Image: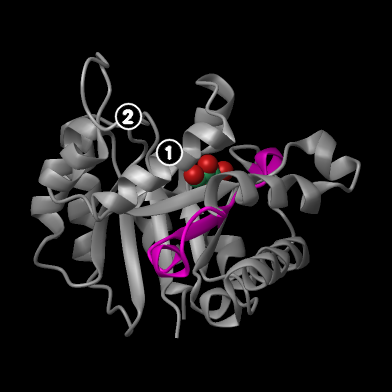
Amino acid sequence: MRKKIVAGNWKMNLTLAQGEQLINDILQAGLKLAEGQEVVVATPFPYLTKAKSLLKNYPGFYVAAQNCASEKSGAYTGEVSADMLQSIGVDYVIIGHSERREYFQESNAVLAKKVDLALAAGIKPIFCCGEPLEVRQSETQNAYVSKQLEESLYHLTEEQLKNVVIAYEPIWAIGTGLTASAAQAQDMHAFIRSQIANKFGREAALHLTILYGGSAKPGNAAELFANPDVDGGLIGGASLVANDFVAIIQHLG
Ligand SMILES: O=C(CO)COP(=O)(O)O
């Protein structure tokens, strides 16, 4: 069966000391992860090594970067490559978060290159997709998301896709307190799975972990995770509070 994942995206928050405290508080909760369940913490780049060393003796706990470069190496001042992330033991990398798409003009084509470099380095991409409010209001979200998948993932082989996680994050629900309803999440996740089945086959689609992100919190996680095509969450704000993050993980079931 496919993996169930709760991933915390810290974004550009916390000092190293605060991040360390947060991880220690999460570990203190003594979570018992069931077979196939994973917890991922996506920290800022400078904390990844520390996060990895704190989590390395805890089976089922992994670290993620929040981005990687779209080039392999070379004169790209300020960039961090997938190979560098691999060399410090990073397990996952978030690719195509809507904040990167919006503020750093990351196109579907650039994201396809990042996905390729991450996979080549042995790091699993958490590929984000999701529509802005006006697209949802015009009820064209399926076509919008489908194009994101097509242009960044459809060049992969079925074998490569096995190492990709998809996160559906409707932009209108990110940091707004507005959550997609359980039915809206399920509808989109089922749609994404059907698109993947059409392109890569039924087996690949059944194996694919699809996370929901956007104002997920302890109070709505159970309802969201109860849907057959929602395999966990990518959590922003609530991942910065140990008790909330732990409560969300517990709702994985
Ligand atoms: O962007 C998100 C996770 O990547 C979601 O953020 P919030 O949970 O703060 O809405």
Q: Is residue 218 found inside the magenta-colored segment of the image?
A: no
Q: Amino acid at mark 1?
A: Lys
User: In this image, 12 relative to 91: left or right?
Assistant: right
- Left or right: residue 195 versus residue 122 is right
Residue at numbered disc 1? 113
Earlier along the polypeptide chain: callout 2 or callout 1? 2
Q: Residue at x 63, y 79 (%)?
A: 228
Mark 1 secondary-structure assignment: helix
Mark 2 touches mark 1? (CB < 8 Å): yes
Vertical side of 15 occupied by 189: above or below: below
Q: Nearer the viewer, residue 197 or 39?
A: 197
Q: What amino acid does circle 2 point to?
A: Glu
Residue 155 falls inside the magenta stretch:
yes
The quarter holding residue 5 reads bottom left
Identify the residue at the far right of this view: 138
Disc 2: which residue: 71
- Return the x and y of residue 215 as percentages of the image width and height: 59, 48
How packed mark 1 is, by other alpha carbons closer than 10 Å (few <14, some 14-19, many 20 or more), is some
Quadrant into which the N terminus falls: bottom left
Q: Is residue 240 visible?
A: no
Out of 208 and 25, give the one closest to the viewer.
208
**Between marks 2 and 1, how big is the CA–CA gap?**
8 Å
Q: Which residues are magenta?
A: 154-173
Q: Residue at x 48, y 73 (%)?
A: 251
Instruction: State the image coordinates of residue 222 (x, y, percent, origin top left).
Output: 57, 72
